[in-house]
Image: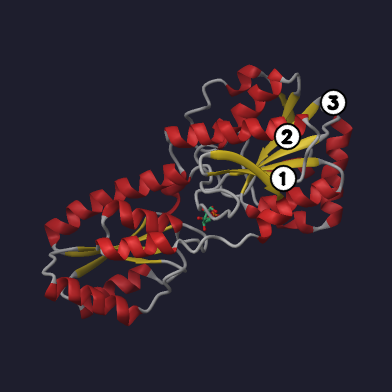
């Protein structure tokens, strides 16, 4: 019987991480398991910064953005000696298993820890929706709401000034935030790693919207790391009938209280994580497919190709 487990949040924070921590703590209590919170992801584990969490340590956290445990990225965790220190700290405290809330980089660390004798379960905590083993990551829908709210506002002012707004969104090489936002806001153009970026082609399309479709403004949503949006907006002013303006939404996309969907998702997935650890099962990550909570081995999840979202891209094209 598992008596003590740890929980940590790792990588970029995402709205709903607190809801997941809360559900881990409360669900574990129902099995008689004690939970230790670990500060700042794997860094806190290696530096032995952990504390016992009671029912009330997660009171009023369900609707809070960010993560009460803090988060960090620790590239050194790839080194065996660093992980050995983490395992030593866990064993000294009698912690037998861990819930790791983060992205696929965090899953890799969790897989290695499982191989070293600490059962780990991964929960998908990232706004990027870039984890193949779940249809939704915790925080994606909240970040999407933030983007949609911003783009709706940008459309108001773009329309008033006959401008083209180029909006850069996050995604870490995954185009989901961009394409979903494009569909939600009726953007004219979406550029993601999936579509690729052909500057001349986008300029031609904008000229078509301006000259043929007689649009007085346009919205281009573009995934981060595709191009320099400030420079591109200047080219739009030069080569199209629109006045170009760039907006980088940045880290505002990661903040804010989680949407109801993310609160429920986080709670459902975290509850499964605790059930698995209670059954002495580790080395798995939990996700949601077809509105059902599922768990699959880390190896399988990390090998799984991400959906190309063909249906969403062709839907977008038909509706423009
Ligand atoms: O993975 C989440 C994410 O917000 C990505 O979308 C983005 O590329 C990255 O983290 C930004 O990281 P940082 O907070 O280190 O700037």
Residue 50 picture quarter: top right
Q: Which residue is mark 3?
A: 1
Disc 1 secondary structure class: strand
Q: Is residue 45 left or right of residue 157?
A: right
Looking at the image, tell me whether mark 2 or mark 1 is earlier in sequence order: 2
Q: How far is disc 2 from disc 3 in space, using C-alphas?
A: 12 Å
Looking at the image, tell me whether mark 2 or mark 3 is earlier in sequence order: 3
Q: Position of residue 228 (x, y in %)?
A: 40, 71
Q: Is residue 55 left or right of residue 79?
A: left
* Residue 319 visible in this rendered orientation of the protein: yes
Cβ atoms under marks 2 and 1 closer than 8 Å: yes
Cβ atoms under marks 2 and 3 closer than 8 Å: no
Using a 10 Å C-alpha cutoff, classify the residue at mark 3 as few (fewer than 14 neighbours), some (14 to 19) or many (20 or more).
Answer: few
Quarter occupied by the C terminus? bottom left
Residue 91 picture quarter: top right
Q: Which mark is residue 284?
A: 1
Disc 2 secondary structure class: helix
Q: Is residue 2 above or below residue 182?
A: above
Q: Is residue 52 above or below residue 123?
A: above
Using a 10 Å C-alpha cutoff, classify the residue at mark 1 as few (fewer than 14 neighbours), some (14 to 19) or many (20 or more).
Answer: many
Q: Which residue is mark 2?
A: 276
Residue pictured at 38% horizontal, 63% vertical: 313
């Amino acid at each position: 019987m598992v008596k003590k487990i740890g929980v940590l949040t790792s990588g970029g924070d995402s709205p709903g991480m607190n809801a997941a921590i809360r559900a881990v703590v409360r669900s574990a209590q129902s099995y008689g398991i004690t939970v230790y919170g670990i500060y700042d992801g794997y860094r806190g584990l290696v530096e032995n910064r952990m504390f016992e969490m009671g029912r009330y340590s997660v009171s009023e956290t369900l609707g809070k953005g960010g993560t009460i445990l803090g988060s960090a990225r620790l590239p050194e965790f790839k080194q065996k000696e660093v992980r050995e220190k983490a395992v030593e700290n866990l064993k000294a405290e009698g912690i037998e298993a861990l819930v790791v809330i983060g992205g696929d980089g965090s899953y890799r660390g969790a897989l290695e820890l499982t191989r070293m004798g600490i059962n780990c379960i991964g929960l998908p905590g990232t706004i990027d929706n870039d984890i193949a083993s779940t249809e939704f990551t915790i925080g994606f829908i909240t970040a999407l709401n933030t983007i949609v709210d911003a783009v709706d506002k940008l459309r108001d002012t773009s329309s008033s000034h006959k401008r083209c707004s180029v909006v850069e969104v996050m995604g870490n090489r995954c185009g989901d935030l961009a394409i979903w936002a494009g569909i939600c806001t009726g953007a004219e153009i979406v550029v993601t790693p999936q579509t690729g970026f052909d500057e001349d082609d986008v300029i031609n399309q904008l000229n078509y919207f301006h000259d043929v479709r007689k649009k007085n403004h346009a919205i281009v949503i573009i995934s981060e790391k595709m191009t320099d949006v400030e420079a591109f907006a200047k080219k739009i002013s030069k080569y199209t009938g629109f006045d170009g303006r760039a907006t980088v939404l940045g880290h505002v996309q990661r903040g804010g209280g989680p949407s109801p969907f993310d609160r429920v998702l986080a709670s459902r997935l975290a509850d499964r994580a605790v059930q698995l650890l209670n059954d002495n099962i580790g080395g798995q990550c939990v996700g949601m497919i077809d509105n059902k909570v599922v768990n699959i081995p880390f190896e399988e999840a990390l090998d799984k190709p991400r959906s190309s979202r063909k249906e969403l891209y062709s839907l977008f094209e038909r509706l423009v």
